[in-house]
Amino acid sequence: MHDLDIVILAAGKGTRMRSQLPKVLHTLAGKPMVEHVLATASGLNPSRTHVVIGHGADQLRDALAEYDVSFALQEEQKGTGHAVAQAQPQLGSGIVLVLYGDVPLIRRDTLADLLAKVDEQHMGLLTVTLEDPSGYGRIVRDAEGHAVAIVEQKDANEEQLAINECNTGIMAMTSAQLKRWLPQLSAENAQGEYYLTDVIAMAASEGVKVATAQPHNATEVEGVNNRSQMARLERAYQQQTAETLMAQGVALADPARIDVRGKLTCGHDVFIDVGCVFEGDVELGEGVRVGPYCIIKNSTIGAESEIHSHSVIDTAVAAGLNQVGPYARLRPGTRLAVKAKVGNFVETKNADVGEGSKINHLSYVGDARLGRDVNVGAGTITCNYDGVNKHRTEIGDNAFIGSNTALVAPVTVGKGATVGAGSTIAKDVTEYALAVTRSRQLEKPDWPRPVKKVK
């Protein structure tokens, strides 16, 4: 491919979003819209990528600091032609592709098809045919069917308003063509702006053919101007993701009720129930079953594990054959060995849970390491924080921790040891010992209960 510059327009305020955040930084599938566009653009292997910024310029610079892009500042928003002109000094001598930061679902193959049509005698224009073209610029063609102009809705006459082939705003041309045409743009129109779309008529007048292409579906080129459109594109994205997952063999209880906000990789025979959310990089091994309304973020769940309903897993690893939940919370640094179990209303953090070990219910285990086949009774907590520093708890293989135990870290419970229910353990417990710290039970026979005094 020729030397390629991609210009992404992202200077608008997005007034109808009613937000202090620049429009293109609003998230779709957990990622700012402009980052979706950048990801698609990178798949075209551009020589350079330029982002035109204006409203919230500093926020955009910060948000995109890790991307290899150059910024062009449009201090006043005077239209798309004016926006592209701000990036013109940075352009090379090859092809220029103009994209929009608020059109997040555009596909790489659609853009590749468009770019393939561009040379010194042709520019490329992406159009879309809509049943209801309201609000879009119309594509005007001559008697031979060649695109010769784009007329914005506010400037269109009755005949032009009847046209249902519409402008997407996405176009490509040689850098030489763009540099010839941009200085000729005029703001003499209903909006008082410099329309990039006017270059179509300039191309036609020069004898440069306007080669058009269309997307696979209209959603691809739909932009976002308000919250309603944002929500519609979110569902469209998630529906596409669901279709891809099912094509890969994933069983979804309801394709309309799944949200993937990152990358979800699944092995064979994975089942995902309704209402689940996956964030960041998540990997589900073969035969994994995820119950309803779970949230899994940046985690790996090993083969044949079952995540029961309403569990939250964040930056954790389950080796396989694990049982988690319902209503469990695995916080960052949790690592479950094979066959380890974390049950209902259990919270773990920075904890290594050994093979076959069980924390069945109503417990908190943080900054801890459990050996093999440990049993942690209900209501057990590791007291890992002294108000300033975190401390670790070590529990050896085959230890048994009775219910309602407080393990005051730093503390070690030896291999095979038993801790009696209701104990507060602040000293190390030796291997195979019994440790009990509960107070002596006091009993008074035939003790009369207090009664209310009659006034």
Image: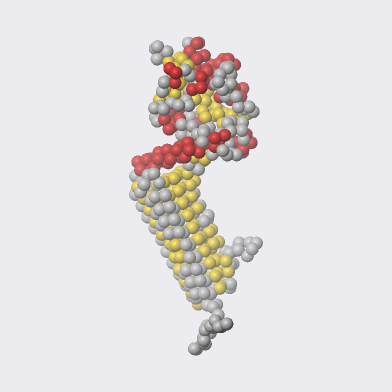
Name the residue furthest front.
Answer: 455
Q: Give whichever of 355, 152 is nearer the camera.
A: 152
Relative horizontal placement of residue 190, taking residue 147 as reference (left or right): right
Where is residue 286 drawn, in percent x and y? Answer: 37, 50
Q: Above or below — where is 366 with respect to 438?
A: above
Residue in view at x 53 percent, y 59 percent: 349
- Chosen colour scheme: secondary structure
Instruction: Mark yes or no: residue 127 visible.
Output: no
Q: Give whichever of 205, 382 is nearer the camera.
A: 205
Where is residue 154 drawn, in percent x and y? Answer: 51, 22
Name the residue furthest bottom.
Answer: 445
Q: Give whichever of 310, 357 is nearer the camera.
A: 310
Residue in view at x 65 percent, y 62 percent: 388
Quadrant for the C terminus in the image = bottom right
Residue in view at x 43 percent, y 26 percent: 133
Instruction: Mark yes or no: residue 273 visible.
Output: yes
Where is residue 247 drawn, in percent x and y? Answer: 35, 41
**Count of numbered labels shown in the rendering:** 0
Q: Above or below — where is 283 with respect to 140?
A: below
Where is residue 422 drawn, in percent x and y? Answer: 52, 74
Residue in view at x 39 percent, y 29 percent: 216
